[in-house]
Image (spheres, rainbow, N blue to C red):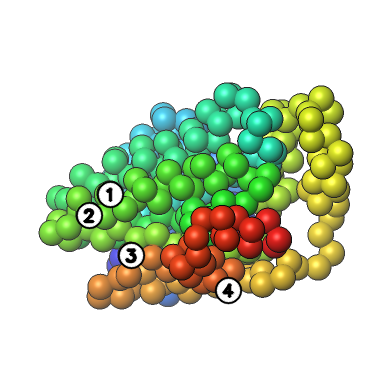
Amino acid sequence: MRSILITGSSSGIGLNAARTLRARGWRVFATCRQEADCARLRAEGLESFRLDYADEASIAEAVAEVVARTGGTLDALYNNGAFACPGAVEDLPRGALREIFETNLFGYHDLTRRVIPLMRAQGHGRIINCSSVLGLVALTWRGAYVATKFAMEGLTDVLRIEMRGTGIDIVLIEPGPIATKIRENAIPHFEQWIDWENSARREEYVRLRGRLYDRKVKKDRFELPPSAVTQSLIRALEAKRPKARYYVTTPTHLMGLARRVLPTRALDWLIAKG
């Protein structure tokens, strides 16, 4: 039975991936940041234990748990968990960037480094990083998240080249708008770090907070369910020769094309209009 370690499995993309892959016959280790979420997943029959990207000890313990349960093998890793901290770049304090990079990039990197030796020893493996359309193009008010995804794209590209000939495939999945809790989960980070009332952009923040706090009653344009990402994940996992990148949603395809063909100022104009 093929095995996979999935992070950020408490809801959304990670949860859908865990359930779907288990149904396809994979042995799934569905990790979550909070033990309460792990207990909920165990209650529905998933193998689940804690892994918090911001906690180095929990990463080491999670990999040790996989080794104990499998005897030292792991076929695939799906780096998925992440969060956003909305706010204008000029209003992002150093601490906000430090916090988001700890989870969205450094945690991915730490976990990946701990898994590679297992895959080297067995002669094969798949490491799949969940990036974003915001790893391809920038978008206003999302500077912190964009920075982590741009950095992930670069680090993943280098790793893919370095892993040539090892039997370990490195893949990026780049979703656009997906129906998840990322907006809801961003609120505590916004409240902790962004002093919007004293910002030069105070009036703009009034509108931003409306979008952030108001309960969404209809899906965003082009938004797809988490299962759309899982379908690309399945292709990345089960293809004999996986692609380096899998775009998910129409905006990702459009922005990927726009980044390749448009001059920078034209792309800036297009994104600003959108």
Q: Which residue does the image show at 65% across and 39% down from the upper left?
A: 85
Marks 1 and 2 close (CB-CB < 8 Å): yes
Relative image position of residue 202 (x, y in whole percent): 83, 34
First along the sequence among labels 2 and 3: 2
Counting from the top left corner in percent of width and height, residue 212 is at 78, 48
Question: Would you place residue 189 above or below residue 219 in this image?
Answer: above
Q: Distance between the residues labelled 1 and 2?
A: 5 Å
Check if mark 3's residue and mark 4's residue have beta carbons within 8 Å: no
Determine the CA span between mark 1 and mark 4.
27 Å
| Earlier-in-chain disc, 2 versus 4 | 2
- Determine whether 253 is above or below 91 in the image: below
Look at mark 4 in the image and give the residue it sits on.
250
Give the amino acid at mark 2: Ile
Task: Name the residue located 34 percent from the left edge and 50 percent from the top edge.
Answer: 156
Q: Is residue 193 above or below residue 178?
A: above
Can residue 125 be seen by looking at this rendering?
Answer: no
Drawn side of residue 241 relative to residue 141, left or right: left
Q: Is residue 76 above or below residue 203?
A: below
Gap in Å between the C-alphas at discs 2 and 4?
28 Å
Q: How far apart are the two marked residues, 1 and 3, measured between alpha carbons? A: 12 Å
Q: Name the residue under label 3.
A: 244
Which quadrant of the structure image shows residue 225?
bottom right
Q: Which of marks 3 and 4 is nearer the N terminus?
A: 3
Question: What is the crowding at mark 1: few (fewer than 14 residues within 10 Å), some, or many (at least 20)?
Answer: few
Residue 64 on image: x %, y %: 32, 39
- Which residue in the structure is indicated by mark 2? 161
Q: Which amino acid does label 4 sit on?
A: Thr
